[in-house]
Amino acid sequence: MTQAFRTIGIDIGGTAIKIAVVWNDGRVVESRQIPTQADAGPEAAQARILACIAALQQAHGLESAAMRALGMDSAGIIDSTHNLVLDAPNLRSWQRYPLAARLGAALGVPAFLENDVNAMAYGEWHCGAGRGVRDLLCLTLGTGVGGGLVLNGELYRGASGAAGEVGHMSLDRNGPRCACGNFGCLERYVGAQYIVARAQAMLERDPRSSSLRDMAANLITPLALTEAAAAGDGIAAAVWEETGIWLGVALASLVNVLNPERVVIGGGVAQAGELLLAPARRTILERAMALPAARAEVVTAALGNDAAVVGAAMLALARAGVA
Amino acid sequence: MTQAFRTIGIDIGGTAIKIAVVWNDGRVVESRQIPTQADAGPEAAQARILACIAALQQAHGLESAAMRALGMDSAGIIDSTHNLVLDAPNLRSWQRYPLAARLGAALGVPAFLENDVNAMAYGEWHCGAGRGVRDLLCLTLGTGVGGGLVLNGELYRGASGAAGEVGHMSLDRNGPRCACGNFGCLERYVGAQYIVARAQAMLERDPRSSSLRDMAANLITPLALTEAAAAGDGIAAAVWEETGIWLGVALASLVNVLNPERVVIGGGVAQAGELLLAPARRTILERAMALPAARAEVVTAALGNDAAVVGAAMLALARAGVA
């Protein structure tokens, strides 16, 4: 049993950077946010990150050496071997800037950078809804649909660190074009904007009364659909049913290919909970092979918005050989 | 560097059992076949397998202890932890019979049983077309479509040993029903009988002259289509083009999810070679994300019918801690 100690995780988003003091079992001690100011470039952010870390260290009496490692994550294509951002739409000027190395050098600990969805998957696996399993598939559903894999008890990154793009599995060779260039991608059916478009299409062709009809178009969001369905709105329920079936069609294929022990569903859209997961589970049982379908437990994520920052911290400890 | 030695691999099929003496680098010394006689049950087969092994040992001066381990593979659902067949359509009465344990005890070496497609993937990875990569996807195309995965440099079996069923990824939610119960499965488009059906449908609606028109229906096989296409038959070429696109649609999704360094395509249908692989590669580049698409090298299998027996032998050495 490793002695308890605290470390730091940093989640770099396009608009905010989250910096958290985390126990080595994954519990968050305190989390702070600072603006990313992506356009000001990575050097400016580096100074503000170090100031925030210094403040957190002082507040918690946390010495740099005691944290053993520094874990970071960011959206985009990450070279996790060299801890560099290779391509991130919201962090254009940050590409190949050695932020992890600079922060690590400033603090005197090894620092590691990971893709945000991989960090989320690892966090859920280490101390969230994926705890205790060997083979985990983790999906994040929001504007985009991403995924992370822990296979044979290890984070799986693929040959160029790009594995896990489950949002861009094609569910229909001739389906609608996706922003990625492919056709009929999962994201094209369950991404937030496409759920909203489904609701609008259903409202047009389904004559039933619905509280959604009184809403301004821009107020129809996945959250509004969840609230309406929970209040008994038939059209909102049908939107989630259809969305859950599409999710289930993709998961059935993934269950056949990966035979995961658990499938963790996170992200804003996952707040629909059973409205989304019940039809997805039913579809997996209807469509996937019996043995892997029976084995795959589909659950909602447990760590919420902390999954990535916690996962980044835990992964850094593992990569530093501490955990 | 491990010293060179020879071991034995056994591939148990529904009609024939292949028993091969194999060097520990995967080269086959000699391979023999005996009939499975599945209905006679596993005990009868066990005696015949031991007799064949004894004959091979004598022919090659191979002592039991020197082979270090015994590797076996079989079609079906395999419990590789306990080395038992759980379910195999062609070996009904063999289920849960401890054939591996009995053979291992008779020879005084540890014996291991693996699923045949996993063994094939491992064989291609160890000493075939997948050699030297960390992340490999291996497909076998025939009457059925199967797959095996080597990820992070390890055979990936999934939570119940059922991983790799890439033939049952759905490429169209509302596509034709597959024998597995799902709809629009890859196997439903590229399984041998569906390639033949595609040829028949094309012959009906495409007025071009074709050597296939002079053939009896039962002579139109994937091999006949390959020969016709190689001889310049436009309809046969179109059949392979469409088949390769379907394969590519599935591979594009797999490339996005798994980001493999290499994709090895084996099985009888893969003998179509570039007729099949060229459109598949083109479709991956058109449909998968740029980074993983550029990374995934799609090649034909190298070990042919020996892949499984070699893979079973190599995997047994690895599991015995020898290799």
Image (cartoon, coloured by chain):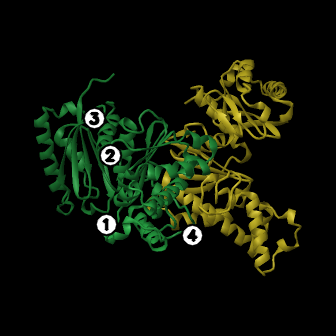
Chain colours: A yellow, B green
Q: Nearer the viewer, mark 3 or mark 2?
A: 2
Residue at mark 3: B27
* Image side of residue B161 versus residue B323, left or right: right
Density class for disc 4 (Cα within 10 Å; few <14, some 14-19, many ≥20) is few
Q: Which residue is depicted at the point 34% across and 71% down?
A: B217
Q: Nearer the viewer, mark 1 or mark 2?
A: 1
Residue at mark 1: B219
Q: Quadrant of the N terminus of chain B?
A: top left
Q: Which residue is depicted at the point 76% across and 59% down?
A: A193
Contact flag, marks 3 and 1 (Cβ < 8 Å): no
Looking at the rendered structure, which numbered label has been put on residue B304? 2
Residue at mark 4: B174
The amino acid sitting under disc 4 is Asn
- Marked residue chain, label 2: B
Contact flag, marks 1 and 4 (Cβ < 8 Å): no
How far across and how far down the image is residue A136, in percent? 55, 47
Does the rendering let one see residue A78?
A: yes
